[in-house]
Amino acid sequence: MKLIFKKDDESQISVVQDIDGEEQEFSYVDMIKALIKSKKMEEPEISKGFTDAETKSIQRMVEFINNEICGTDEAVS
């Protein structure tokens, strides 16, 4: 499962999830189910318009989730 972050011209942010190659509306329940099944979140897709700080924050969030799933403090690739 991969999260896709989009930002429009008016700075509105939206998140959708890519499940098996299909974009679907973001759902925490679906995200948890996918994480239980795969044990890993893929690297997020981040559209243009995000600042470097926002991009790094999103990437850190995914890294943190993956580390928590694996139960280790080592970075997950």
Image (tube, rainbow, N blue to C red):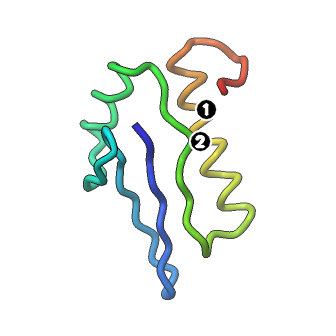
Q: Are marks 2 and 1 in contact (CB under 8 Å)?
A: yes
Residue hosting label 2: 61
Farthest front residue in view: 21
Farthest top residue in view: 71
Residue drawn 35% across the image and 20% down it: 36
Q: Is residue 12 left or right of residue 27?
A: right
The image quadrant that residue 71 belongs to is top right
In the foreground, 18 or 53: 18
Q: Tell me the amino acid under the disc marked 1.
A: Phe
Q: CA distance from mark 2 to mark 1?
A: 5 Å
Residue drawn 49% across the image and 87% down it: 10
Farthest bottom residue in view: 10
Q: Is residue 71 left or right of residue 41?
A: right
Q: Can you tell which mark lies on residue 64?
A: 1
Q: Tell me the amino acid under the disc marked 2.
A: Met
From this view, report whether residue 68 is shown above or below residue 23. above
Q: Locate the N terminus by quadrant.
A: top left
The image quadrant that residue 74 belongs to is top right
From this view, report whether residue 3 is shown above or below residue 7. above
| SS assignment at label 1 | helix
